[in-house]
Amino acid sequence: MHEIDTTKYVIHANITAEGFVEKSDVVGAIFGQTEGLLGEELDLRDLQKSSRIGRIEVNIESKSGKSSGEILIPSGLDKVETAILAASLETIDRVGPCIAHVEVTKIEDIRATKRRRITERAKQLMREAIEKGIGSEMMVDEVKQAVRMEEISNYKGLPAGPNIESSDAILIVEGRADVLNLLKYGIKNAIAVEGTNISPAITKLSKRKTVTAFFDGDRGGELILKELLQVADVDYIAIAPEGRSVEDMTYKEIAKALHNKMPVEQQEYIRVKKEQEQGQEPRIIQRKSSKEKEVEKEKSLNPFETHLQELKGTFKARLLDRGKNILKETTVRELAKELKETKEPANSVVFDGVVTQRIVDLAKEKELDYVVGIKMGDVVKMPTSLKVLTADSI
């Protein structure tokens, strides 16, 4: 099969047709019936022109008036885009005049296959070198690195080192490449969040482990850190040098960053870091003195804070009456719909999420007195009749 230079995955699919069809008929059906289906960015013809999709291979046979075979499509797209493209193949229902059915059997990770082949070949070469009495430090290092790459495991759908469950302390990093780089240097207790949509698995794991967040020294790393701090119990923060990625760091740089990790205080850390980046002298905020104990006591008894703490990490929302009692509990995803349709005499809404303009507008329509969320989003128009509180302002 012809492969493009940047092939990462190969889509494997089976095809059956109620009649005699040839390879050209199948290829034509693939292009014709997926055209315009996924938008311009995933148009097959354009992807093939830009060499992000290789030549489509079709092996098909016809017997007793029926045809069946296999479709192979090499892809240089990322995993998600490749999966979407693969799923689109299953919408094909005709090839020429014949009724047809396509089923994707697997998406092969070419890089994983190559790594296995490299590792086996390296082991073979090492055995041959030992038999001939030839030692090579470079060969040993290459084999160790390949073996460590094989050690990457999967924790509830997330890339992780093999010690993620057994270790009392873990590192939370951004992506799979970061986990691999840490494995390269023998650090086996890292797990990747894979984007800003933090998995509930991370939230649960953080509650029973000592957690160090170790992110890239760029804007993306800062955004992911902010999101992580909203949903997980993080104990320490380590940051790569400015403009650097964890996946590119040397052992010495990694050791230094982890040595300089700092205890986490969410808002204080983010504020100080931002002021440092702007060339300002960070302001040190003193803890409240004893004369404010009554204020602290009053705050600790705030029912909104109690509800928000109970909802933390659940992605749920509660409608409350005037006595701050629960009228109804729903998911954050369904909150807007619930606010529109509820007949309950609600006075407040508390939820584990970001306060948006849409939620504020719906709360005003329902004549609520309070909206309480984790943090404030892009709210431009704030009604005077509504009080909006966040985790920091309760």
Image (cartoon, rainbow, N blue to C red):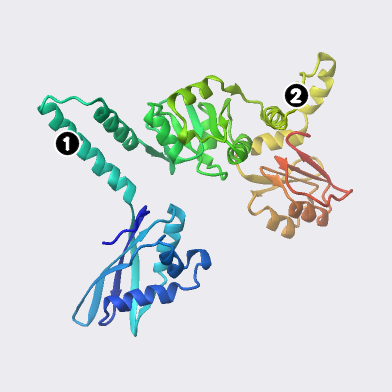
Residue 91 position, x and y percent, is: 42, 71
Which image quadrant is residue 19 in?
bottom left
Q: In terms of secondary structure, where does tag 2 sit?
A: loop
Q: Position of residue 195 (x, y in %)?
A: 54, 44
Q: Residue at x 28, y 46 (%)?
A: 114
Left or right side of 162 for 327: right
Residue at 43% across, 25% down? 251
Q: Is residue 116 visible?
A: yes
Q: Few, some or many C-alpha atoms within 10 Å of disc 1 (few <14, some 14-19, many ≥20)?
A: few
- Percent position (x, y) of residue 99? 34, 80
Q: How many marks?
A: 2
The residue positioned 24% from the left and 44% from the top of the image is 117
Mark 2 Cα-neighbour bin, 10 Å: few <14, some 14–19, many ≥20: few
Q: Nearer the viewer, residue 298 or 226?
A: 226
Would you place residue 239 above or below residue 360 in this image? above
Check the picture and name the quadrant holding the N terminus. Answer: bottom left
* Label disc, if present, on residue 281 of the rendered structure: 2
Type of residue at label 2?
Glu
Q: Amino acid at mark 1?
A: Gln
| Image side of residue 271 versus residue 227, left or right | right
* Residue named by callout 1: 124
Compare residues 72 and 367 and report the one nearer the observer: 72
Q: Quadrant of the C terminus?
A: top right
Q: Nearer the viewer, residue 30 or 251?
A: 251
Secondary structure of the residue carrying tag 1 is: helix
